[in-house]
Image (tube, rainbow, N blue to C red):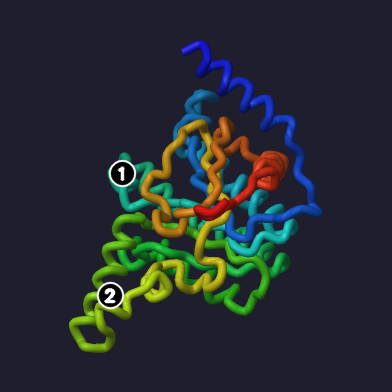
Amino acid sequence: MNWLFKKRNQKEKEITAVSFNADEKIPQHIAIIMDGNGRWAQNKFMPRIAGHKEGMNTVKKVTKRASQMGVKVLSLYAFSTENWKRPDDEVSFLMQLPVDFFDTFVPELMEQNVQVQVMGFIEQLPKHTRNAVEKAIADTKENTGMVLNFALNYGGRSELIEASKAIAEKVKAGEIEVEDITESLFEESLMTHALKDYQNVDFMIRTSGEERISNFMLWQNAYSEFYFSQELWPDFNEQALEQAIGVYQKRHRRFGGL
């Protein structure tokens, strides 16, 4: 176990030594699992919802910086299909967050030329949440800059099942043959199809020190680079994003080749 600790400690030192270079490659599609809001609040002897509120401010900071750096798509895991299992008061607060977030942040998104997209089972959201989401999408649809893509009531396995059902229906209706099913055809049925050339993730970040994918964009993350930050999401700022991208810039993506 001692060698494992030393190896991880050395890796963390290497990460802190890496600096972001604006002239090097920038990941076109960054996906983030925003983890650690509850723990951040508990560490400060505050209710968990205080962490979610602070996490919303982090979303604003990271979104602006990512847009300035030239990122094409920023996908954020805001609420999973499994998060309904949380206490009712926490779920209610999380369902109100998009309302408050878009109410205050859409004007800034307009200034940044950022377009809002949302993937997930939106029809299952409370009406006030759904209305806020749909309004933000409509208000920013003409923007041509970075896409801020929220995963809201989203689950990767459910997405794959729904895509499979959609293709099966086309086969059943005689629109396509089984032999016609390809990766590109399958991607047309995914919730990220509107992202077009940027559908697949280049760089996936998870905060809070946890090292798992948690049912997030299972297809799209097939060849993404992963980065696990020890920082809790409310503490993850513009400098933390730059540091993460600095690590990405030192990697060589081979996609199964040499």
Q: Nearer the viewer, mark 1 or mark 2?
A: 2
**Residue in the picture at 67% in, 41% down:** 247
Vertical position of residue 203 compared to residue 141: above or below: above
**Element carrying mark 2:** helix
Q: Is residue 135 left or right of residue 252?
A: left
Q: Is residue 243 left or right of residue 93?
A: right
Vertical position of residue 49 compared to residue 186: above or below: above
Please state which amino acid type lies under the numbered disc 1.
Answer: Asp
**Residue, far bottom:** 174
Tag of residue 88: 1
The number of discs equals 2
Tag of residue 34: none
Looking at the picture, tell me which residue is in the foreground, 189 or 182.
182
Position in image of residue 205 (x %, y %) = 55, 44
Residue 68 visible: yes
Please state which amino acid type lies under the numbered disc 2.
Answer: Ala
Residue, disc 2: 166
